[in-house]
């Protein structure tokens, strides 16, 4: 691989950190991240995206990072969701390269120097892949394995199994992702979709340092549906084949009834067989309508064209605690 010089790629790093009610994790995060950033031979900034926190997340950030001139808080007007918060962070990132990392430290920031070296060597996207998920429950590990297996069979943009949000991306990838207008965001797919030079870096996933995950199983399920419907039309197409299969089975059964009646005469139709047929066909029809509804609902959201996120204010930290700026944008 051709090594790209520092002068040609720049040396400014933006660390994008989405936060939602994370007042207890901010100080441990900074205690661990501070030494890593200090040893990097690049200028850096940290962009915290507050996704509608209701606790003391912002005051704690201001307290912990008091006196820092390269920390910015992008406060969204309400809770839009993690994917939208990541888009906001990339929108405000000024660096030649950006690192997306969760504040819970389940993804090790110690890998950041190696990620930067791979970027300097020419990789546009460096993605963290979890080699083990010992901190997750059996159900979560099984569901994650099932999701990637199904997704990669259906999608035109297959992803590395157990891919995380922890990644390092080049400026041009940032600009491509931010420019994409879709409202139902699946950031992992969006980062992998442009192509270019991509690589993965593996690590074991640790437990959260504080608090609980803000992703419930329902949110994870909706996230999986967003991923499948954003990068594949197979769930729609499959119902054509299901309908054809049911039609063929129906024709075969009709031929069987004609032959049986011709040979043995007419018998009394059975209630059970009728109910089974009605329930099976009715269930298939409802499931197929639900799948059509998923795609139709996403078309409805996209056609309205509402902003992906709204910003209440942007707080630029400086050496003076009262020196902040605010503006509204999207």
Image (cartoon, rainbow, N blue to C red):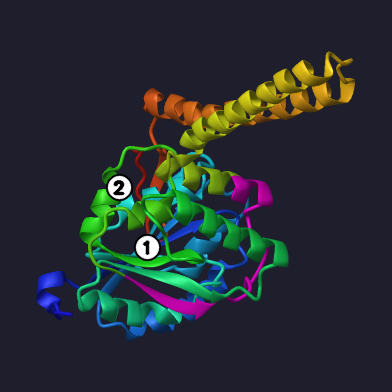
Residue carrying label 2: 178
Q: Position of residue 151 (x, y in %)?
A: 49, 53
Q: Is residue 289 left or right of residue 167?
A: right
Residue nearest the observer in this picture, 76 or 156: 156
Marks counted in the figure total 2
Q: Is residue 208 left or right of residue 241?
A: right
Q: Position of residue 152 (x, y in %)?
A: 46, 56
* Magenta region includes residue 225: no
Report if residue 22 is visible in the image: no
Magenta region = 199-221
* Magenta region includes residue 213: yes
Residue nearest the observer in this picture, 31 or 123: 123
> What mark, if any, has residue 320 been given in the picture?
1
Q: Quadrant of residue 45?
A: bottom left
Report the mark closest to the observer, 2 or 1: 2
| Placement of 254 over or under 7, stated as above or below | above
> How many neighbours does mark 2 have within 10 angstroms: few (below 14), some (14-19), or many (20 or more)?
some
Q: Position of residue 203 (x, y in %)?
A: 49, 79
| Placement of 283 over or under 150, stated as above or below | above
> How many neighbours does mark 1 have within 10 angstroms: few (below 14), some (14-19), or many (20 or more)?
few
Q: Position of residue 92 (x, y in %)?
A: 31, 52
| Placement of 88 over or under 100, stated as above or below | above
> What residue sits 26% from the left and 44% below the top?
179
> What residue sits 40% from the left and 77% below the top?
201
> What residue sits 65% from the left and 25% below the top?
250
Between the C-alphas of marks 2 and 1, the distance is: 32 Å
């Amino acid at each position: 691989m051709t090594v790209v010089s520092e002068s040609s790629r720049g040396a400014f790093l933006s660390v994008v950190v989405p936060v939602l009610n994370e007042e207890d994790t901010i100080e441990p995060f900074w205690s661990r991240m501070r030494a890593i950033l200090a040893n990097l031979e690049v200028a850096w900034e940290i962009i915290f995206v507050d996704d509608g926190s209701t606790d003391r997340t912002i005051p704690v950030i201001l307290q912990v990072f008091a006196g820092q001139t390269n920390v910015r808080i992008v406060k969204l007007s309400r809770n839009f969701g993690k994917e939208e918060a990541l888009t906001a962070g990339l929108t405000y990132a000024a660096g030649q390269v950006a690192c997306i990392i969760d504040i819970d430290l389940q993804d090790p920031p110690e890998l950041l120097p190696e990620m930067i070296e791979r970027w300097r060597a020419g990789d546009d996207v460096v993605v963290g892949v979890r080699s083990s998920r010992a901190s997750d429950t059996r159900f979560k590990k099984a569901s994650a394995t099932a999701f990637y297996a199904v997704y990669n069979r259906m999608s035109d943009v297959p992803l590395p199994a157990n891919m995380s949000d922890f990644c390092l991306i080049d400026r041009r990838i940032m600009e491509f992702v931010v420019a994409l207008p879709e409202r139902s965001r699946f950031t992992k797919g969006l980062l992998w979709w442009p192509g270019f030079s991509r690589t993965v870096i593996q690590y074991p996933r640790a437990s959260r340092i504080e608090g609980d995950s803000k992703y419930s199983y329902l949110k994870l399920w909706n996230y999986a549906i967003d991923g499948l419907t954003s990068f594949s039309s197979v769930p729609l197409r499959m119902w054509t084949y299901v309908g054809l299969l049911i039609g063929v089975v129906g024709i075969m059964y009709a031929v069987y009834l004609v032959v049986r009646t011709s040979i043995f005469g007419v018998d009394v139709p059975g209630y059970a067989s009728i109910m089974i047929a009605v329930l099976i066909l009715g269930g298939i029809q409802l499931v197929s309508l639900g799948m059509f509804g998923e795609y139709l609902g996403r078309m409805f959201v996209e056609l309205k064209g509402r902003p992906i996120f709204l910003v209440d204010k942007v707080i630029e930290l400086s050496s003076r605690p009262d020196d902040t700026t605010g503006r509204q944008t999207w």
